Amino acid sequence: MSDLLLDTQQAFDSIAQEYDGVSGNNALIQRMRNRLMLTIKQNIPYGQHLLDLGCGTGLDAQYLAQAGYRITAMDWSEQMVQRTKTRIVNADLQDRVETKHLGFHQIHELKPERFDAAYSDLGALNCIEHMDDFAESLFGLIRSNGKMVVSVIGRICPWEWMLYISKRQWQRARLRAAPEMVPVPLNGKTVWTHYFAPGEFAHSFIKAGFQLVSVRALGLFVPPPYMIGFAERHAGVVNFLQQLDDRFGAWPILRGWGDHFLLVMQRRD
């Protein structure tokens, strides 16, 4: 097991108890989360069995289970998995949600189980060390014509550029351009993160046997979640910017920008 995996696990373990608040579910995050949930409903029929890749505290798993899906929720953080288990029990959804303490590097342990589709929210897949291996394993877990719906942290975030260039923090402004995994601070610890452009991320999955269905930007005009203070002070402006995101986020070129991008892929057979 690599030191990068352990660092990332410890960082998310340390924040699990507070992650439903400003750290992991503030109003800006909820905007992106809502778009992902809508996209799942538009692409995946109710009643199907979904694999939640990086379930966090289980907010998505609970929502989708209540909407009529069956969920297997996995996460590398043991504390996050425990939060998910507690949430599911409190919501009386044990018959619809199964939780597993597994990292992405352990996804092969799910075989021979098969899933109708998979999803991942808010950049969990940015923490994968070996994307080609992961994509091949995921292909083997998804049924014929099954889809994956994922939001991934992108390389080109105009708000971030403007913020850190205005502060003359040149190295931080260039962080997302790094070709390798980079250390990102979280609660005094480190999350190792690989930023992607949409085509760069999709490449591993296309090689594995998926095809690209759609891509759109998330947080293109709206500021990134760590700027929640600015967003709360300028709520009217941010609501207008969200309308621009909704209207233009799927346009060519623009769909590759933003704090995150939302990608739908489908297994080819």
Image: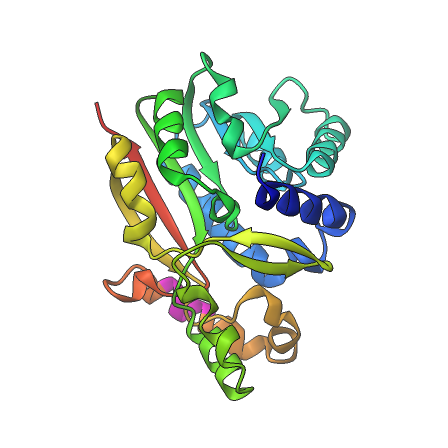
The residue depicted at 68 percent of the width and 58 percent of the height is 23
Does the stretch in magenta take in 59?
A: no
Residue 143 locus on image (x, y percent): 34, 20
The reply, left or right, for residue 165 in relation to residue 66 is: left
The residue depicted at 51 percent of the width and 71 percent of the height is 223
* Res 74 quadrant in image: top right
Tally of numbered discs: 0
In what quadrant of the picture does the N terminus appear? top right
Q: Is residue 207 above or below residue 144?
A: below
Residue 163 locus on image (x, y percent): 52, 80
Color encoding of the figure: rainbow
The residue nearer to you, when weighing 59 against 211, is 211
The residue nearer to you, when weighing 247 against 52, is 52
Q: Main secondary structure of the magenta part?
A: helix
Q: Residue furthest top?
A: 112
Residue 251 locus on image (x, y percent): 26, 63
Q: Is residue 111 above or below residue 228?
A: above
The residue depicted at 49 percent of the width and 80 percent of the height is 170
Q: What's drawn in magenta, residue-wise? A: 242-246
The reply, left or right, for residue 194 in relation to residue 76 is: left
In what quadrant of the picture does the C terminus appear? top left
Residue 31 locus on image (x, y percent): 53, 58
The residue nearer to you, when weighing 191 against 26, is 191
Q: Is residue 17 above or below residue 22?
A: above
The residue depicted at 47 percent of the width and 81 percent of the height is 162
